[in-house]
Image (cartoon, grey):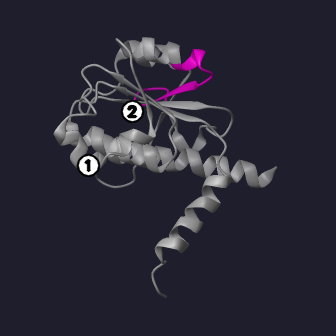
Amino acid sequence: MKPLSPTDLKRLHRRWRKRTDQQLGLILDGVQQPFNVGSILRSAAAYGVRDLWLVPPTADPGDKKVQITAKGCDRFLHLHTAPDGSAAAEVARAAGYRVVAIELVEGAAPIFETDLSQGPVALVLGHEERGVHRRTLESADATAFLPLTGQIGSLNVGHTATAVLAEVRRQGWVAADSR
């Protein structure tokens, strides 16, 4: 097998982009580490996130350390700020999004068992150690978690973002294929 040429790679991604019509958003609820924010911005742009809300003390996308991992991908996103996570959830909901917090809490459903294929979805990701703020969790429409099977109980928030964004897109493609 030979690697795809740049033209073939563009065609491949264009084909998947044409199959993707679901609006996707993210709420970063106090994600402080610049490299994590940069990684999330890059994954968000790669998976076609439209709106991204930044809740203090989330690192500024313009920060040099953020840009090391974001590589300028923030230019593909509509960035918004909100004073707190519940306000971001309220604005996202008013824009038509269903708000789903990603957090390891009692009552959260496995992400793979949470229907994320219907309508616009805004995923909430929280602080690297403390997670999503309690008030933000209370304002979410649903809570889901990423099941892990190894000896580690949680992932870095940037890796979690990539995994859940991929799952939302996967569910959307499967749902579109079944119509």
State the SS at label 2.
loop
- Is 35 on the left-hand or right-hand side of 104? left
Given this view, does label 2 or label 1 mark the residue nearer the observer?
Answer: 1
**Residue with the mark numbered 2:** 104
How far from the left and from the top, in percent, is residue 160? 38, 44
Residue shown at 53%/20% (left/top)?
92
Query: Which portion, as a residue range, is magenta?
Result: 92-108
Label 1 crowd bin: few (<14), some (14–19), many (20+), radius 10 Å: some
Up/down of 96 relative to 24, above or below: above
For this rendering, which residue is in front, 108 or 135?
A: 135
For this rendering, which residue is in front, 152 or 28?
A: 28
**Residue with the mark numbered 1:** 69
Up/down of 33 relative to 91, above or below: below
Name the outermost residue toward the bottom: 1
Amino acid bearing label 1: Thr
Residue shown at 28%/42% (left/top)?
38
How far from the left and from the top, in percent, is residue 3? 45, 81
Up/down of 41 relative to 60, above or below: below
How far from the left and from the top, in percent, is residue 55? 33, 20
How far from the left and from the top, in percent, is residue 156? 28, 44
Amino acid bearing label 2: Leu
Q: Is residue 135 visible?
A: yes
